[in-house]
Image (cartoon, rainbow, N blue to C red):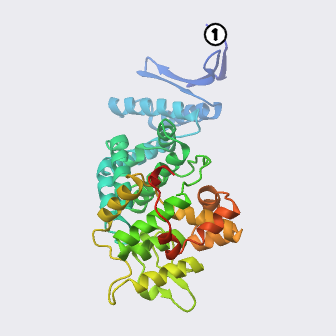
Amino acid sequence: MKLRNQNIVRAKFPRVYEYNHPKSGTYFLVDARRKKWGLTERKTFPTKSLALKHADDIEEKFQKFGTQTDIPKEKVVLADRFEGLTLQLAHFGKTPEDAVKNYVEQLGLEALRQIKPFIRDLVDQWEKYKKSDQTVTKRYLNEVHSLCMFIKRTWGDLKPDDVKRNVIDLKLKGMKVNNNTRRKYRLFIGMFFKWVVDEGHLVKNPALGIKFKSEEYQGQCYTLEQTKNLLRHVIETNRDLVGYFALLTFAGLRPTEGTRVQWEDYNEVTHQLYVRKGKTPARYVDLEPVAVEWMKFHRENTPEGTPFVNVTNLENRMKKIRIAVFNGKWIQDGLRHGFGTHYKGLTLSIHKVADQMGNSVGIVLRHYARTITKDECDAFWKLTPSVVMADEPESNPATN
């Protein structure tokens, strides 16, 4: 009886039928069943040509070897399974050989992944690597340690391949901090994963492409009276640090740059100061007359053979100065911010400020360049040692 949606494509043995199934679609059946010969083979194919070829092969085999087969049953079963795999993969344009090759590759990748170290171990190695750099500051290393602890707490039990870009992005977006802080976290995370890539544990840095819009920010700085009181206190109690504080205040040096200054870095004829390489490349800065006065004062009050700045126990001395002058309230980089603001008022050039401070124009605009009055600007650039020592200090400078 002819089945519904069935067409005979090949009438002789082995027969080939075409079926049109409403769900499976069109397929072709090769029927090679014969009870008298003990044959039970029925196979389906996705195309007519494959089905006809298989039928021709069976016919050719019968003509050559007769109806008896010496193929073991287990091999027939394997052949049937292979046939089934072929049909399944044919819908995707692939062969069993393609599937095996892909599976072997995946097994290899998984084996490599299993031998990769955990992120917590890589973080420890990276922190050790960062600490071996003798050019970075203790403050920077403390920041590195803090960020390393963050990475270990967050992803320490994962392998490098497990941390994807969206995972980092969502973690940073979920933190209750501003975008500037998120940018800082992203920077350190990116530095860590770049090192992981360089060490051969990862192909691509997952932190690449994550961006957060900068929020409006202007660095705080000290008032004129606060600056005067600070400089006066240094003259009276820590005179060997006068040059250090003067260059932070009137040349815009970073604290770490100030600690590296040596007497030979200053040219008393041209009044140029060589700022040694640190966070940024080395540069020359031109000192304004008020800074020249402070350099002269420092030279006159420093014994011969004494270094420009004595860095021994400097951190503890700085803490005592903060407590004495500001009741412990210290503006991070406040002196540098003040220089950037007043130097912009003096030169009316953002580019000159950026060049003098070793920053980009964008950084100067975002952090250092507040707008001030001409009177305030003029008063700042007249704060010579004699002017500072002439006035009495305010009773509570920290509140000014």
Q: Is residue 17 above or below residue 287?
A: above
Residue type at mark 1 is Lys
The N terminus lies in quadrant = top right
Q: Nearer the viewer, residue 117 or 320?
A: 320
Q: Position of residue 187 (x, y in %)?
A: 49, 54
- Work out which residue is located at the far bottom of the displayed protein and give it: 269
- Quadrant of the rendered structure where residue 122 is? bottom left
The answer to whether 40 appears left or right of 146 in the picture is: right
- Whether residue 298 is situated above or below residue 100 in the rendered picture: below
Using residue 78 as the reference point, say whether residue 347 is left or right of it. Answer: right
Residue drawn where x is 55% and y is 44% of the image: 179
User: Residue at point 52% right, 58% down?
Assistant: 222
Check the image and name the residue furthest to the top.
1
Residue 396 sits above or below residue 237 on the image: above
Q: Is residue 344 above or below residue 180?
A: below
Q: Nearer the viewer, residue 215 or 250?
A: 250
* Residue 397 in the image, given as x and y percentages of width and height: 46, 54
Query: Along the line of sight, which residue is nearer the eye, 391 or 209?
Result: 391
Q: How many marks?
A: 1
- Rendered location of residue 316, percent (x, y): 29, 62
Picture residue at 55% right of the left edge, 71% below the top: 383
Is residue 82 visible from the viewing direction of this image? yes
Front in this rendered view, residue 162 or 314? 314
Q: Quadrant of residue 77?
A: top left
Disc 1 crowd, CA 10 A, few/some/many (<14, 14-19, 20+): few
Q: Secondary structure at mark 1?
A: loop
Tell me if residue 12 can be seen: no
Q: Which residue is mark 1?
A: 2
Is residue 294 found left or right of 215 in the rendered image?
Answer: left
- Residue at position x 37%, y 46% in the image: 151
